[in-house]
Amino acid sequence: MACSQDPNENLAKAEWRIREAAGNGAQIVCLQELFRTRYFCQEENSAWFDLAEPIPEKPRKASKKNPGTPAYMAPEQLLGEPISHRVDVFSYGVSAYELLTNQKPFPGDTPREILAKQLDRSGFVAPRQLNPDMPASLQKVILRCLERDPERRYPFVGMMVRELQAALYV
């Protein structure tokens, strides 16, 4: 997908690609490469999707080889607890937060430091404190994605997309 200088155009293209994938039977969309730039633009490279798996019937333990960048991993991943597709929702929230604030929501140099900040939210900075131009409704979506408890995150990416569309008037 070619990048445009218009972030709304790039968001619309990314949304179209997600809808196309869902229409072709995809149960999971790899969000880690969706935000390669601040304009929601991605390059097409099927190699990035080699880790995608179908949504399991119930949460499962991750393998010993738990690939991922700790800053984008959900607390349950870092704790070695059973995971579900909601870890992708968390990763999306981290990416969106970073995209809109130029900072990670839970900064740290090690997985242990990142996890400590995920679990103890006393020093957490809401995204609108760093970017006051962000609509409150967009912050609400991001904060729900970043919930510590997976059950409090969006149960389906489609629900998140609908709330994002409403927040962004698209």
Image: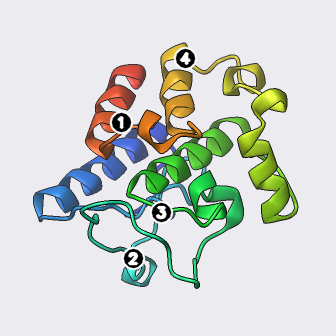
Give the labeled residue for mark 4.
135
Residue 125 seen in this snapshot? yes
Q: Amino acid at mark 4?
A: Pro
Distance from Cα at disc 4 to Cα at disc 3: 34 Å
Distance from Cα at disc 2 to Cα at disc 1: 21 Å
Q: Quadrant of residue 151?
A: top left
Distance from Cα at disc 4 to Cα at disc 1: 16 Å
Mark 2 or 3, nearer chain start: 2
Q: Is residue 133 above or below residue 7?
A: above
Relative depth, front residue between 81 and 105? 81
Q: Is residue 43 above or below residue 151?
A: below
Residue 120 placed where, x, y %? Answer: 78, 37
Mark 4 or 3, nearer chain start: 3
For label 2, the crowd category at 10 Å Cα-Cα, with few meaning under 14, some 14 to 19 and many 20 or more, is few
Which quarter shows the N terminus?
bottom left
Give the labeled residue for mark 2.
49
Residue 74 seen in this snapshot? no
Give the labeled residue for mark 3.
82
Residue 121 placed where, x, y %? Answer: 76, 32
Give the labeled residue for mark 1.
160
